Image: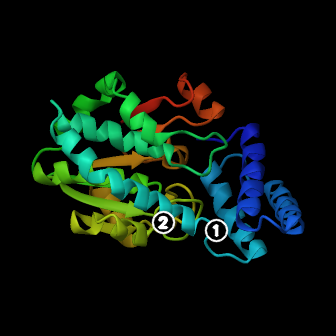
Amino acid sequence: MHPQLECLICLLEQGLRCARRTLPDQPDKHEELVRAWSAELATLDMRQTVPHWAGHLYPLGAEILGVLDPFAEAKREANEQVMSILPALRTQIRSHGNPLHAALNVSIIGNYIDLGVKLSFDWRQALSDETDMAFLEKAYGPFFKKLQPGARLLILGDNAGEIGLDTILVELLHERGVNVTYAVRSAPILNDALLEDARFVGMDRLCTIMPSGSRTCGTILEQGTAEFLDAYAGADVVLSKGQGNFESLYNRAGRSIFFAFKAKCDVICRLLDCSLGNSMFLYQK
């Protein structure tokens, strides 16, 4: 999707939050980052996507701050928090009348664990409160109809923590006989999941994991590795997790794709005519 003018402001706010989080006592570095990002934003193409832009800005920010992965500790904490509740949550989902339905809902709730957005969401409380799954109905039938035994599913992962909640869905699909591949980012950006996060939550014991080649908070196909692009083209089903993947692939996927994410900004809400915090499960043919 094409960015809007609000996206320019949002990215500058992201950069400032990142600088203050990483070097809280160095306001000169905060100013340096904001000025550098402002200059860079003025050169970027409005026909690209916000993840394209972020892929230019965050490496510059890491260089200014002198920290390769400013969100490493936040990712570790999110993974640990999810893993601590996962056994009880798994039992709860497996006892549901439609475990796959419930697992997909939980997987989408996990997309609240996002440090790139200005608003803060309580994902733990949402696991208890957000039990209405009517939003799944329109795309649920086509999605699971395609996931017959032997089907090849490629999941485009998003955030640390969230990836742990995704393991329950992957477990159930594996038991159904679906061949799952799970793709993560190839470089640190925000709190997006890397291979080390996939291994931490045990995703590598459930399915094939791979880096996508994308070095930003989305899936940029032109950055894809040969292995990833083969998996992407050959999959019977692609499930895109998270708002960043939606922003980078909406009307750009080049194939049919399912999007599963939380709507977390006004630009997305206007585009999809939804409210902040709404769970989205969409099928783009």
- Sequence-first disc among 1 and 2: 1
Q: Work out how far the residue at label 1 is from the one at label 2, CA to CA, in angstroms.
A: 12 Å
Q: The N terminus is located in which quarter?
A: top right
Q: What's the mark number on residue 113? A: none
- Crowd band around label 2 with a 10 angstrom C-alpha radius: few (<14), some (14–19), many (20+): some
Please tell me which residue is depicted at 56% across the width and 56% down the height of the picture. 217
Can you see residue 258? Answer: no
Residue 196 versus residue 181: which sits nearer the camera? 196
Q: Residue 167: percent from the left, percent from the top?
A: 28, 54
Residue 98 in sight from this viewpoint:
yes
Is 219 situated above or below 241?
A: below
Please identify the quarter of the rendering in which residue 2 is found: top right
Across and down, in percent, residue 180 comes to: 23, 57
Residue found at x 71% / y 52%: 14
Q: Name the mark nearer the viewer: 1 or 2.
A: 2
Residue kind at label 1, given as amino acid type = Pro
* Mark linked to residue 70: 1
Tag 2 residue = 76
Residue located at (54% from left, 49% from top)? 114
Q: Is residue 45 left or right of residue 135?
A: right
Type of amino acid at the residue the image marks with label 2: Arg
